[in-house]
Amino acid sequence: MTGIVLPSTDELRARALAALDRVDVTVPDGEGLLARTPVTGEDLFALAAADADGTEEALTAAHEAFLSWRTTPAPRRGDLVRRLGVLLREHQEDLADLITIEAGKIRSEALGEVQEMIDICDFAVGLSRQLYGRTIASERPGHRLCETWHPLGVVGVISAFNFPAAVWSWNTAVALVCGDTVVWKPSELTPLTSLACDRLLARAAEEADAPRDVHRLLLGDRAVGERLVDDPRVALVSATGSTRMGREVGPRVAARFGRSLLELGGNNAAVVAPSADLDLAVRGIVFAAVGTAGQRCTTLRRLIAHRDIADTLVGRLTDAYQKLPIGDPFDRATLVGPLINTEALYGMRDALGRVREEGGRLLAGGDRRTARTAPHAAYVEPAVVRVPGQSPVVREETFAPLLYVMTYDTFDEAIALHNDVPQGLSSSIFTRDQQEAERFLSAEGSDCGIANVNIGTSGAEIGGAFGGEKETGGGRESGSDAWRAYMRSATNTVNYSGGLTLAQNVSFL
Ligand code: UN1
């Protein structure tokens, strides 16, 4: 048996408490929720969770805070986010510890997640002096036609375990400078990380003299999320998670004419053309397919390789896979940490079983790695499977390090295969052929919200808008002009002519 060596749950508990203490969090004792760690697969603490009254109180408080926050000048709102960015820098290691303990991310990726939070704070501070509207040419003399962007209301953020802090920060940093307030329902799997984020924001609010209730955290189960989804005071529900979750959230929010911003499943592919630099492609593919143990929504799940280079590429990939260090995510040599839980492991096994029945051939990985001290932890060897085509299981998102490889002959065939899945988040092409690269990025190329050349599907910077099409939900978060989803626009016509001229040449009175 290939055993892996892990820290004990007691050590992890002590490390979590030390990080929480430095951030100034007191763990709320209670029976509502269990904090656990995928590193050993064991429980850490029992915590208090929000009930119906607590949820109501938080929504009322956040709505009241909105009424004053919306008239605070945007650059002053930026002061709060600037303070948050400073505190995140000071506590980068502490938050990274909590992310590793609760989500199982390796050290470098956990620190990277906090860096992503710092980056979005910087972006949002800059945004707080922008939030531009346009002035439009009026058809009438002595008239000014323009648009103004106003705060929207309370934003309900529902986030997933795999980016337990960064996805919250993309939403919250931008929502706050836009003049909204936030109520956050994080994944039940990562309560400690959320407590730390909430505390840092509360400290920033104190320092920046902002109302405490600009942000409220609600630890709890599905019922808490449902209350956010159904409450008319929540103007925007920004939800990250599975397509199944989005299918429930989207129509419920729409039924009350609320807005939703959905970041759902991805089934991301890379095309590898015959001209590709294979050294670069192999590194890009392995990071995208194996990083975060295959549990990013941007994880590379399908590889579409040209027939001429497919065998060479697959050979190099399986070599790289065999050498991947799997185990303790705190060990700096580790590249693959645990899956979030055994359910995820069984999901991967199930997909491997199905793909074999559908004609797939396992080329590398797929076995569980066990630790004598942690029978409930879910460590697995990332897998590569050669598939004859896009059979049903290949068209689904399995949230695990499972890469399906298929081949193509013509570029058109590659694009058709690429787009022939229900999801549309991220995509990439490895090529040195400029025409192919440009066609991949064109209107008849990738149908995803993110399309890359000579870089993998995951690891987007915050400066661009993040999100995808089709069953990925259509939302855009983070950079570019994603902020507009967090505001409402008003069109203003101002008549300074002294007379009354009607549009469309209408005469009246
Ligand atoms: C997610 O997996 O939910 O592009 C977000 C990336 C990260 C964000 C992923 N910047 O992989």
Image: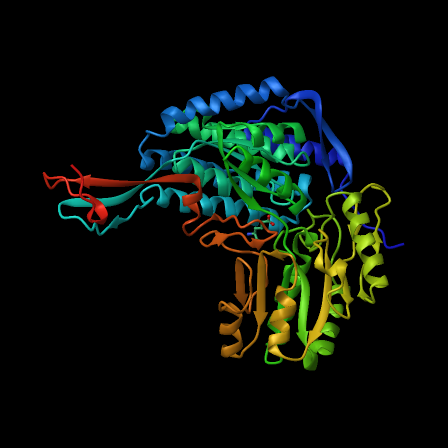
Q: Residue furthest bottom?
A: 308
Q: Position of residue 75 (x, y in %)?
A: 32, 37
Quarter of the rendering containing residue 240? top right
Considering every residue shown, the one lying at the far right of the view is: 1
Q: Is residue 330 left or right of residue 78?
A: right
| Residue at figure coordinates x 28%, y 48% from the top left | 134
Q: Quadrant of residue 53?
A: top right
Residue 480 lies, in percent from the top left, at 42, 52
In the depicted view, which residue is nearer to us: 396 or 119?
A: 396
Above or below residue 497? Residue 235 is above
Identify the image quadrant of the C terminus. top left
Residue 85 visible somewhere in the drawing: no
Residue located 62% across and 28% down the image: 224
Q: How many marks?
A: 0
Quarter of the image with the N terminus is: bottom right
Quick check: 26 above or below 322?
Answer: above
Viewed as shown, does residue 498 lie left or right of 278? Answer: left
Name the residue nearer the viewer: 68 or 277. 68
Residue 393 visible in rendering? yes
Which color scheme is applied? rainbow
